[in-house]
Amino acid sequence: MIRPHELLRVEPLDDGSYFMQASSIDSLGLEGIPSEPFPVNVRTNPIPPFIQSPVDGTEYKTVTMEFSWLQVEDAAKYQMEIAEDPDFSHVVDEKELVRKAGYKTKVLLPRTYFFRLRSIAADNYVGVWSDTIRFSLLQPPPAPSSEPPKKGKKEINIRWKDLGEGFSYHFQLARDKDFEEVLLDRMVDRSQCAFRKPRKPGQYFVRVSAVKADGFEGHFSSPQSFEIGCFEW
């Protein structure tokens, strides 16, 4: 029994259709005629996934962020959001992922972010959001400014600004400015790199990032390019 103006709380129910009815009881305990049955549909599945990473409240030394969660059996896909505020009014990334249990962002600015996730069933029923996860990205090392590549007879040489003691450098050579086709990927201790001149003619791109002694890698520099002609050899 509940008194006027009180709320009725029901124990968790399995998903399904239910009916509810009520009747009044006077001060003498006499019960009136029950109301017409009122249909109630309950659906709580699919539940939100259990988030494995990131860990709530943790600071990370990275310029991108990787997320992982456990699969929900009756989820056909997942919807995720990353925002700059806990109310998710400033969303910086959102995706629907089909049966995937992970996601890696593009480069993010160093600041605090908020992440949440929910499951979507095969019939497109959208479940509730998970608890919000708060994480922060720390300020990365600066990208070294580099000089234009210098072509020798057999080698290409490139130099960049030395950031001082405690830094190493991540060097890449590619055929495209987006670095989807990386030809050379090398870690070096000095602020320069030399490599054999490519045999195929065309345009090539190079870039470099700084890495602290603790392994924290910063952003890559803006790509520099050079040309290999048809008659270089």
Image (spheres, rainbow, N blue to C red):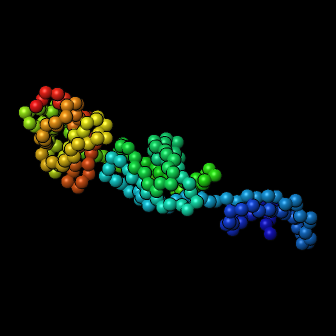
Q: In the figure, is residue 26 to the left or right of 106? A: right
Q: Is residue 48 above or below residue 145?
A: below
User: Residue 56 location, x and y as percent?
Assistant: 43, 58
Which residue corresponds to the image point at 44% horizontal and 54% vertical from the top-left? 102
Q: Nearer the viewer, residue 223 or 191?
A: 223
User: Residue 133 location, x and y as percent?
Assistant: 46, 55
Q: In which quarter of the image is the C terminus?
A: top left
Which residue corresponds to the image point at 92% horizontal and 64% vertical from the top-left? 33
Q: In this view, does 112 lie above or below 28?
A: above
Q: In the figure, is residue 78 to the left or right of 63? A: right
Q: Which of 183 and 57 is in front in this view?
A: 183
Q: Which of 230 and 43 is in front in this view?
A: 230
Q: In the figure, is residue 90 to the left or right of 195? A: right
Question: In the rendered image, is residue 224 in sight?
Answer: no
Q: Residue furthest bottom?
A: 29
Q: In this view, does 133 lie above or below 229?
A: below
Question: In the rendered image, is residue 84 in sight?
Answer: yes
